Amino acid sequence: MAMEYFDEKIVPILKKRLPGADLSGRLIGSAPVAGPSTSLTTMSLLAKNTPSRSEMTKVQQQVKVNGASMTALRREMQEVRVKQLEQQKQLQDQEQKLLEQSQVIGEQNARLAELEHKLRELMDSAVASTSSSSSSSTPAAAASSSSTVSPAASAAAEGESGLCLKRPRKCSDLPRHSKRLRSKK
């Protein structure tokens, strides 16, 4: 607005008084000088493009904070990786123990099946011997048939008559442990 006023009111007066001046207020032959409007626009453009000191310090502080948080995150990631490796090793150890225990259980199941088979055979032979001895009428024949029966068969026969089939423990004060547990002591 000031420029319009200057161009409309002041320039015509200056033309009358100074015949050597051109329309823009410059003297003929003089170099163009940056006016107030051009210097203001240049200053405003520079101010818009260059950040202020406070903005720069804020950005620098934010960079420092971000760097510190990145360092903390890297440290935390390293700790998580270490924990993951420890847990993975622990999992592998547990899988190995599980495999070993599965093998032991398989061996024990096979041994149990074998012992159950032997027990059935002994019980069948004991039943057969008791049925044959009860069918004979003389006590001498019964005595001879019972004397030829193995001790295990006689124990099986006693089991049928209501007595216990279990073997007596060597030491009844101590709890029974498997061979595997005894070997680890």
Image (cartoon, helix red, strand yellow):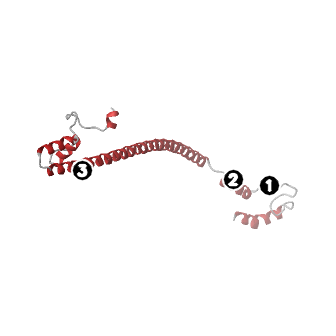
Checking the image for residue 46, the label placed there is 2
Q: Amino acid at mark 2?
A: Leu
CA gap, disc 3 and disc 2: 111 Å
Q: Residue furthest bottom?
A: 8
Q: Measuring 29% from the left and 46% from the top, which residue is drawn there?
A: 118
Q: Disc 2 to disc 1, how far (Cα)?
A: 19 Å
Q: Please report contact status of discs 3 and 1: CB closer than 8 Å, yes or no.
A: no
Q: Residues within 10 Å of mark 2 (few under 14, many from 20)?
A: few
Q: Quadrant of the N terminus?
A: bottom right
Q: Is residue 56 left or right of residue 82?
A: right
Distance, label 3 to label 1, CA atoms, is 130 Å
Q: Which residue is mark 1?
A: 33
Question: Where does residue 51 sit, x and y in percent of width and height?
Answer: 63, 50
| Above/below status of 38 relative to 185 | below
Nearer mark to the viewer, of 3 and 1: 3
Q: Amino acid at mark 1?
A: Val
**Looking at the rendering, which quadrant does residue 147 occupy?**
top left
